[in-house]
Image (cartoon, grey):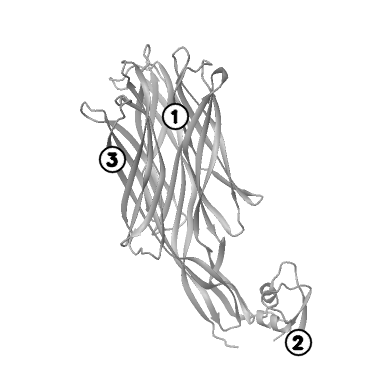
Amino acid sequence: MSNELKLTADTVCVTEKLLDTTEELPLERDFVLPDYFPDVFRILRCTVEPRLDSQTVTADKLTFELTAVIRVLYLTEGSRRINCAEQDVELSRTVELSADCPAPEVTIDLAARGVSCRAKGSRRIAVRGTVCAALKVCCTREKTVLTGGSGCGIQLRKQTVTCPVKRLTASKRITVIQQTSLPEDKPAVGTVLRTGCVISRSECRTVAGKLAVKGEAELEVLYACIDKTGEDCVQTLKFTLPFSQIIDMEGVDDSYRVSAEVTPTGCSLMAGSGEEKTAEWELTLNVFCAAEKTGTSVYVTDAFSTEYECFPDDTAEIPAGQADSTTLSANAECTLTAPDGTVGLVCDCSAECGRPTIRKEDGKYLLTGSVTCAVMGEGSEGGIFCTEGQCAYEAELPAADSSVLTEANAAVTGCSYYLGEGGSIRVRTDVRICCKTVSGGKVKLVSSVKMDEEKPACRDNSCAIRLCRCVGGEDIWDIAKRTRTSVEAILEDNELDSDTTPVGMIVIRNS
């Protein structure tokens, strides 16, 4: 038996989670209306739209900055015109990470919670609420893992694994601006009351050592205007805006599997200048691209020695397979009621949803979340109202034994309504859920072993052979490790093959 331990190794790509938490940023804003705004008579609705401005990782800290866009819709006395008082509030937060990370992957999901608004007199408005930031920071590192070895009685359990061996990332913020003509049946844009954006399609591919990202965004805006008769009204305008961008990523080629995650961070609409009815759309997107190269090799998953005290000293947990995406559909229904019990006209129906929670049970993943629905309309007597409420959505994804659901995002893709009795409004929302799964589950690979040559393995040498009772669930490797012998010796002495599950008593030879 050689007394010199020799080990062979290779490198794999390991993703470490440095942060997974939710930060709450208090939002408090008292503001006075500008002189050119009319007085507040009745507040219809207040919304807060948080937009991510920047994120930086320095040493072991994450700092992010955001702008909370406050929109207060209100009426002035004796008028049907809907006014919108808009204020921007800048917020920031610094969070410590569990370790330093030279190449972080940062995910920040923003949502406003508990928003309340009240008028303090006819010129001052007070807004209170909380911006919740779901933070996730991962770091991708190359780590050495064992592929083989000999000497000092070392026994290695090996497994053929397909796993990431290289991962590249890049991110970029892009702004898309396009001017369009309004449809003939739409009045000119007055005051923007609400904006919305959903990424309906996106794709990513490698072109000459760079990444080409393109897709389409479905934009929607609600605005106050004056119709052909000179009356105040509100209109909804929808537009499909294509986008494309070339993103630099050093080292990427056709051997990498590439993907892009496109997140809208801001959408605005401005009336065009001149007499023509035009509008200028401006869309801001965060684009995060990842390129991953996988390889198949034989790696060590466990180790012990028949001669000395020995055990794995460090391990690396990696996905044993490729990442994939699955899209699910869900529906949510919410019943709202007009304040005066009558509905003469519905001017706007919208909804937004939060990130789903993931729960695994009975061989499937349950994805649940909430949808906030809002309706603006007129009562039968002509009074304008806004009403909103929440409902839940749910979807299921079969949980295959060899796959793990790692992440899920949701977006509202459609919203419709129908009117019931007593001023009830039934809102139906279509939700698209994008799931990220990893086939093959996860496997722990041995990065290093600790061998103590001053502590020989304890062994009973009073007999030549022993009988060992197999414990339920043990395989040949488990028995060899427990009895400090080799797998090959057990197979040979008991005339077994490597696929056999031992049952009852087997022979263990003291070598």
**Outermost residue to the left:** 274
Relative vertical location of residue 273 with respect to residue 240 in this rendering, above or below: above
Question: Residue 85: where, in percent of width, then height?
Answer: 35, 25
Q: Are marks 1 and 2 in contact (CB under 8 Å)?
A: no
Q: Which mark is residue 464?
A: 2
**Residue 65 visible to the viewer:** no
Relative vertical location of residue 80 with respect to residue 148 in this rendering, above or below: above
In whole angstroms, how far apart are the C-alphas of marks 2 and 3?
A: 83 Å
User: Could you say which quadrant of the image residue 178 lies in?
Assistant: top left
Q: Which mark is residue 177?
A: 3
Amino acid type assigned to the residue bearing label 1 in the image: Arg
Amino acid type assigned to the residue bearing label 2 in the image: Ala
Which-is-in-front pick, marks 2 and 3?
3
Of helix, strand and loop, which one carries label 1?
A: strand
Dot 1 corresponds to which residue? Answer: 128
Query: Which of the pair 455/493 is nearer the observer?
Result: 493
Q: Quadrant of the C terminus?
A: bottom right
Query: Which of the pair 75/124 is nearer the observer?
Result: 75
**Outermost residue to the bottom:** 1
Question: Residue 20: where, in percent of width, then height?
Answer: 50, 50
Query: Which of the pair 162/448 is nearer the observer?
Result: 162
Amino acid type assigned to the residue bearing label 3 in the image: Ile
Of helix, strand and loop, which one carries label 2?
A: loop
Q: Residue at x 72, y 67 (%)?
A: 473
Question: Residue 450: where, in percent of width, then height?
Answer: 56, 74
**Residue 283 visible to the viewer:** yes
Indicate left or right for 21 with 493 as reference.
left
